[in-house]
Amino acid sequence: MPRDTALIPAASLMILDDRKGNVMGMDRIAADRIIDGKKFAGSLLDDITARVARLKDAAGAVPGLAVVLVGADPASAVYVGSKHRQTVAAGMNSFKYELAAETTQDELVALIGQLNVDPVVHGILVQLPLPAHLDTNAVIQGINPDKDVDGFHISNAGLLSIGQPALVPCTPLGCLMLLKDQIGDDLSGLHAVVIGKSNIVGKPMAQLLLSENCTVTIAHSRTGNTPELCRAADILVVAVGRPGLVRGDWIKPGAVVIDVGINRVEIDGKSRIVGDVAFEEARHAGAITPVPGGVGPMTIACLLSNTLTAFCRQHSISID
């Protein structure tokens, strides 16, 4: 989509029920303004799969991703299973390490040390959160930065901060891809507001937007004028874990809104997943990611993209 200084015109819009395809009501968000992260992620995975096949033909090897799960947290187990399936589907080697919750720090660090030097492992991911007795930061910093496909190692964070090539955290990378798909490759001069300052999303998201020559403002729990800041944003990225924090009247007409939040709430006695943006109030957004189905599917796709990048760098091969 070509870049326009007004972004995407606002209008009085409608939204479709995902399950039935029926119009749910007036003055809501039209289906063509809803950013389909699942579709975009599918296209990205198709491209990754094709590149892996070409690498196999040319180099006789494929990327390998090792995922380490400590304990039996149900949500983490689901995520690890999904990562394994999509890794295999892309033609990569998948290595799962499922460790007991009682695993010691020394045992976990020793495993990571083995994976760091394993020539068939090109990417390492330790599923978070870890059990409370383990030092998460020490574990992450123990990963070889060249294999840190989560992009959390201090070396990759530092490279990103100075605009040098790095393995970038997957969720912010996916957000940037979705933004460029909506606005175009040139984001320069646009005002971007990022709500949230975590090392996983907020800070790297701000760095990525700075690298695209956006004017970036970060808001957080101690920011006193967050609604006012949001109303001036051409791009609004929200990642705080507070359901419905951003109201419709916070959103600038035509702005592109990326909702990273994933919150489970009870509505009419039923459990639902919602984002940090009051979705049905976002009538003036030029485009917005839904929850679920927006940013979430991009995270695993970008994990595999990072694994492919890591493989190519380790073998001094062009990623194309």
Image (cartoon, grey):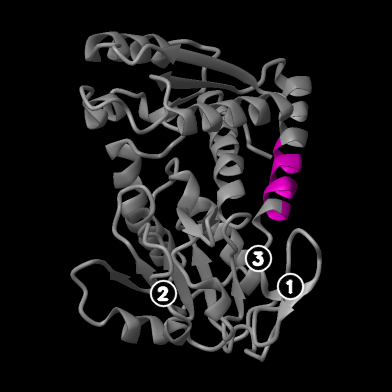
Identify the disc placed on residue 246.
Answer: 2
Going by the numbered disc 2, the residue's amino acid type is Val
Measured in 3D between alpha carbons, the distance from the residue under mark 1 to the one under mark 3, in whole angstroms, is 9 Å
Q: Residue at x 80, y 71 (%)?
A: 22
Q: Residue at x 60, y 19 (%)?
A: 94
Q: Is residue 159 above or below residue 99?
A: below
Q: Residue at x 65, y 65 (%)?
A: 35
* Among the two numbered marks 2 and 1 on one chain, the one whose residue lies closer to the N terminus: 1
Q: Quadrant of the C terminus?
A: top right
Q: Is residue 108 above or below residue 80?
A: above
* Among the two numbered marks 3 and 2 on one chain, the one whose residue lies closer to the N terminus: 3
Report the magenta residues as a range.
Answer: 39-48
Report if the CB atoms under discs 3 and 2 are less than 8 Å apart. no
Q: Would you name the residue on which mark 3 appears?
A: 35
The residue mark sitting in front, 1 or 3, is 1
Going by the numbered disc 1, the residue's amino acid type is Ala
Measured in 3D between alpha carbons, the distance from the residue under mark 2 to the one under mark 1, in whole angstroms, is 20 Å
Crowdedness of circle 3 by 10 Å Cα count: few (<14), some, many (20+)? many
